[in-house]
Amino acid sequence: MEIKSGRKILIIDDEEALLKNIGDFLKILGYDVFTSPNSSNGLELLRNHKPELLLLDLHLKDGITGIEVLRAAKMLKPDLKIVISSGFGEEEEIKKSCFSFGANAFLSKPTSLKILSETIKNILEVK
């Protein structure tokens, strides 16, 4: 297994079980993982820990949309890599908006851990 020590990933998702499972999985792969069930705490973690990649749920329950978090995250850290995830069948216009605001990938939930880890690896390897 390839160790990715020092590679930081932030996960913002309001599904607590999913947040824990994906966080634990990425830690096993060697990433430094920070998790938040809401946008405000998530953006604070982004400011404090400066991760390389953000795994962001598009539909958060705390009143701020994933697209708003995406835009704020890119303003805070323009070089941040962002993977959007959603359990809703998103319309193409929403996906286009995500990419226009700087998302690197869009994954539908549920996503297999294999696809998630390959997506993250491919995004982080692009320099």
Image (spheres, rainbow, N blue to C red):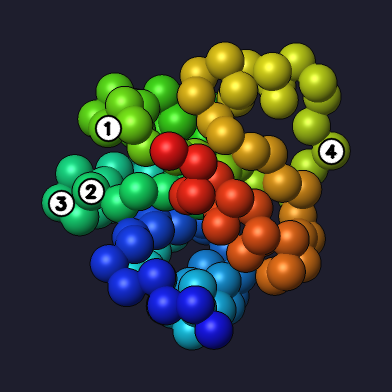
Q: Nearer the viewer, mark 1 or mark 3?
A: 1
Task: Kindly give the residue lying farthest to the left in the view shown.
Answer: 48
Tell me which numbered mark, 4 or 1, is placed earlier along the sequence: 1
* Residue at screen point 45% across, 31% down: 70
Tell me which numbered mark, 4 or 3, is placed earlier along the sequence: 3
Dots 3 and 2: beta carbons under 8 Å?
A: yes
- Which of these two is toward me, 115 or 58? 115
Q: Amino acid at mark 2?
A: Lys
Q: Residues within 10 Å of mark 4 (few under 14, many from 20)?
A: few
Asked if one can make out residue 124 in the rendered structure from this viewpoint, the answer is yes
Q: Amino acid at mark 3?
A: Asn
Q: Amino acid at mark 4?
A: Gly
Q: Nearer the viewer, mark 3 or mark 2?
A: 2
Q: Residues within 10 Å of mark 1 (few under 14, many from 20)?
A: some
**Residue identified by numbered label 1:** 77
* Residue at screen point 70% across, 70% down: 113
Quadrant the N terminus occupies: bottom right
Q: Nearer the viewer, mark 4 or mark 2?
A: 2
Tell me the element at label 2. Answer: loop
Tell me the element at label 3. Answer: helix
Tell me the element at label 4. Answer: loop
**Residue identified by numbered label 3:** 48
